Structures are given as structure tokens and as C-alpha cells.
Amino acid sequence: MNTWHEVTTLEEIPPLGARVVTTNHGDIALFRTAEGEVFALLDRCPHKGGHLSQGIVFGKKVACPLHNWNICLDDGNAVAPDVGCTRSYPVKVENDVVYLSLA
């Protein structure tokens, strides 16, 4: 069962961009797609630890700013031929308020 924490509003996350929230689990990047979907990933690329929040969002992926690895926003997996995974977190939006579960 998820415990939800209010972290920001939808308007605080730019379309095709990210916002970082600091938690006891580390920095978590909240990404917003062009369609308005919101995803949450640990803000570390599985390749060299680059800040994914500084990458370019396209579709349901983000390109790491260090070496252009593409990471799926929905599960944190690197897109082949690259391999690796960064942790993803459940997120929901209700009435334009973004909630994050750290479970």
C-alpha cells in the first residue's frame, strides 16, 4: 500500500522538463511529458550517475545529459543497447497536485 506525500503542483514541473525534490531516499526527479503525464525517478543515470533532471524529455524517455543514454520514465530502464536501471517511484496527480510514494 502506498503512502502518498504531497510534493508540488503540476504547474511547477515544466512540460518536457523536470523538478527535483530532496528526500531521505536521495534526490528524486519529477518529469512531465508533453501529454502532461508525470513520472518520478531517482535523479541518477545508471551509467555514470548523471543528473537525469538535467536531461531532455522526449516521449516517455529522458536523455541523460552526460552520455545521451535514454532512460524510460515509466520504469527507469535504459533503452537498448544500453543496460541498467534507476529506481522509479509511484506518482499521482489529483486536482493539479503531485503526490509521490517512497514505498
Image: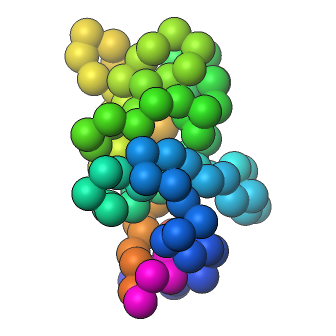
Residue 28 rendering spot, x and y as whole percentages? 61, 52
**In the foreground, 61 or 3:** 61
Picture quarter containing residue 1? Answer: bottom left
As for residue 98 lying within the magenta part, the answer is yes
Query: How is the structure coloured here?
Result: rainbow
User: Residue 43, how many percent across, how many down?
Assistant: 60, 41
Residue 85 at what x, y percent from top left?
41, 32
Q: Is 91 included in the stretch rendered in magenta?
A: no
Q: Residue at x 40, y 37 (%)?
A: 57
Residue 15 image position (x, y, % from top left): 43, 53
> Relative to 19, is 61 on the left or the right?
left
Q: Which residue lies furthest to the bottom in this view?
A: 95
Direction from residue 3 to residue 32 in the image, left or right: left
- Total numbered circles: 0
The secondary structure that most of the magenta stretch takes on is strand
* Residue 19 at least partly seen: yes
> What residue is shown at x 62% (from left), y 74% (from top)?
7
Please report the residue visible at 28 percent of the width from the left and 43 percent of the height from the top. 60
Q: Which residue is drawn at 43% across and 25% down?
A: 63
**Image height of 103 relative to 71, above or below:** below
Q: Give the range drawn in magenta.
A: 95-99
